[in-house]
Amino acid sequence: MHEVAARAGVSIKTVSNVVNGYPYIRDSTREKVEQAIADLGYQVNVTARNLRRGRTGLVGLAVPELSLPYFAELADSVIRAAEARGLTVLIEQTGAVREREIEVLRGARRQFTDGLIYSPLGLGPDDVHELDGVDYPLVLLGERIFGGPADHVTMSNVEAAKAATQHLIDQGRRRIAVVGAHAGETVGSAALRVQGYAAALEENGLPFDPALVGEAGLWHRATGAETMARLLDADLGIDAVFGLNDALALGALHTLHLRRVDVPGQVAVIGFDDIEETAYSSPTLSTVHPGREEIATTAVDLLLARIEAPDADRPYQQVVADFSVVARASTLGEHAAG
């Protein structure tokens, strides 16, 4: 640091302020210091800097299951957002098991991380008290718990599902099946997306037929394929399918292919999540892009703000990411772009 200060013609304190992101420095001074750092190949000792600040530079990310493509891609987005801000991410899987999700909140690893981005599936609205003892920065993802002592980033499940269903209706579809409902669920992604589906039907004067709502416990390709087979066997006159996530929709596509059902000629298919695979399936899968990058970046920024100012008296934020319908060949056929 002495060499950088000498080369830039400033004090060691000024170099330290630039390295540590102190905001009140003239642009010309900052530029001189940054040029000197580049010329000398100086590297910041992040570990030492974090120790001085009482921080580790590590943040946790707890997700249900990395074998689910959405969470794998979300984790990738969180890692990239964190790295851009000088943070390293420690990932934990909970398996969507309630006890494991509570353990992650209370576990020893929290002593070694500066905060946690937390996506529960096993916990529900009645478990909000489990967050009461949390004494570290926490950002919630998802739809299982609301109103807890934490910032919260979520997606527009109802409106996005409504838009997906409306897209099918706009293509002239009237007997639209759902793949992936959870029996008895009143909160969570499945319930909210079915709610959006039902709202679109109602707005278009179409009846809600419970027989068209196919249940699937796990949101995997295999369960999507099995649920699609049951719906076809019931001979319900289906002309479209809304998979509540892309894995379910891809499984449904597989069954339709095996049954020699033309997609989208006979049955149109749309999913939800816009995972990478959907752009390469055959046919390419229409889906909903839920704002994954926005969710990841916002979660990291909210967490970092709490880490850097843990005593700041500011209300917890709830942020809802933007979404968009991505129309591809599984609903548009030969009219699909690209």
Image (cartoon, rainbow, N blue to C red):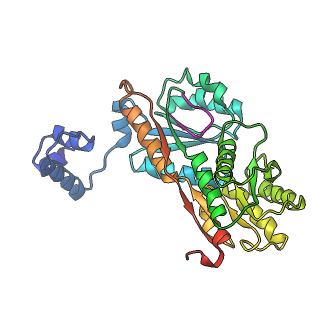
| Outermost residue, left side | 9
Magenta-highlighted residues: 139-147
The residue located at (18%, 39%) in the rendering is: 24
The residue located at (73%, 72%) in the rendering is: 263
Q: Choose between 105 and 191: the one closer to the eye.
A: 191
Counting labels gives 0
Residue 268 shown left or right of residue 140 in the figure: right
| Outermost residue, front side | 205
The answer to whether residue 46 is seen in the rendering is: yes
Residue 81 shown left or right of residue 186 in the figure: left
Quadrant location of the N terminus? top left
The residue located at (19%, 56%) in the rendering is: 35
- In the figure, residue 192 lies in which quadrant? top right
As displayed, is residue 285 above or below residue 110? Answer: below
As displayed, is residue 106 above or below residue 161? Answer: above
Per the image, is 303 magenta? no
Q: Choose between 235 and 222: the one closer to the eye.
A: 235
State whether the magenta stretch is mostly helix, strand or loop: loop
Residue 208 shown left or right of residue 76 in the figure: right
- In the figure, residue 177 lies in which quadrant? bottom right
- The picture places residue 141, in percent across and down from the top left corner, at 55, 40
- In the figure, residue 252 lies in which quadrant? bottom right
- The picture places residue 160, in percent across and down from the top left corner, at 58, 52
Quadrant location of the C terminus? bottom right
Residue 330 shown left or right of residue 309 in the figure: right
The answer to whether residue 284 is seen in the rendering is: no
Per the image, is 144 magenta? yes
Q: Choose between 246 and 199: the one closer to the eye.
A: 199
| Outermost residue, bottom side | 334
- The picture places residue 212, in percent across and down from the top left corner, at 80, 53
